[in-house]
Image (cartoon, grey):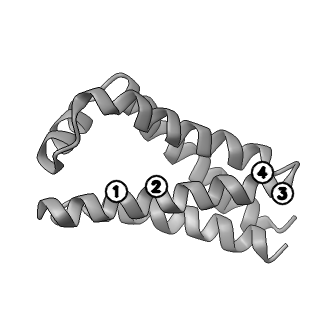
Amino acid sequence: MSIAYLVVTVITVVVTAGVAVADYIPAGFVLANSAEVGVPRSWLPMLGTLKLAGAVGLVAGLVVPAIGIAAAVGLVLFFIGAIVTHIRAGVLYNIAFPGAYLLLATASLLLLAMQ
């Protein structure tokens, strides 16, 4: 296991789990952003669960790589969906946030695949 993979994956887990918790609370910025892009508030717990499942899967992937690959693919698809949602709503000023999550998930996937 490479140091780069470990570092990137741990960062991805921390930030993804953090934003999942923000979905569960729900934090003010999550409510504002979801309303702006047209995501119903009732979806937030499920979206948080998907993010948290991805984070847990990445942790499990440190032991069982196939689980990590599945989790990383899921997170990549999730955050592509988030970016598409922002673009469809015309909300581009904060698209860097889902973009950063997408980059981290993609980096985790690529580094794991290179193991």
Which residue bears the numbered disc 4?
A: 67
Identify the mark at residue 65; answer none if there is no mark: 3
- Image position of 38 with respect to 69: above or below: above
Mark 3 vs mark 1, CA separation in Å: 25 Å
Question: Which amino acid type is marked by label 4?
Answer: Ile
Estimate how packed mark 3 is, as few (under 14), some (14 to 19) or many (20 or more) residues with alpha carbons within 10 Å. Answer: some
Q: Please indicate, yes or no, whether residue 91 appears anywhere in the rendered image.
A: no
**For residue 39, side relative to residue 108 (left or right):** left
Position of residue 10 measured from the top left corner of the image (x, y, whole percent): 66, 51
Q: Residue at x 14, y 59 (%)?
A: 89
Decide which of tag 1 and tag 4 comes sooner along the chain: 4
Q: Check contact, mark 3 vs mark 4: CB within 8 A.
A: yes
Determine whether, in the image, residue 56 is placed left or right of residue 24. right
Label 1 sits on residue = 82
- Asked if the residues shown at circle 3 and circle 2 are in contact, with their CB atoms under 8 angstroms apart, the answer is no
Secondary structure at badge 2 equals helix
Determine the secondary structure under disc 3: helix
**Local crowd size for mark 1, using a 10 Å CA cut-off: few (<14), some (14–19), many (≥20):** many
| SS type, badge 4 | helix
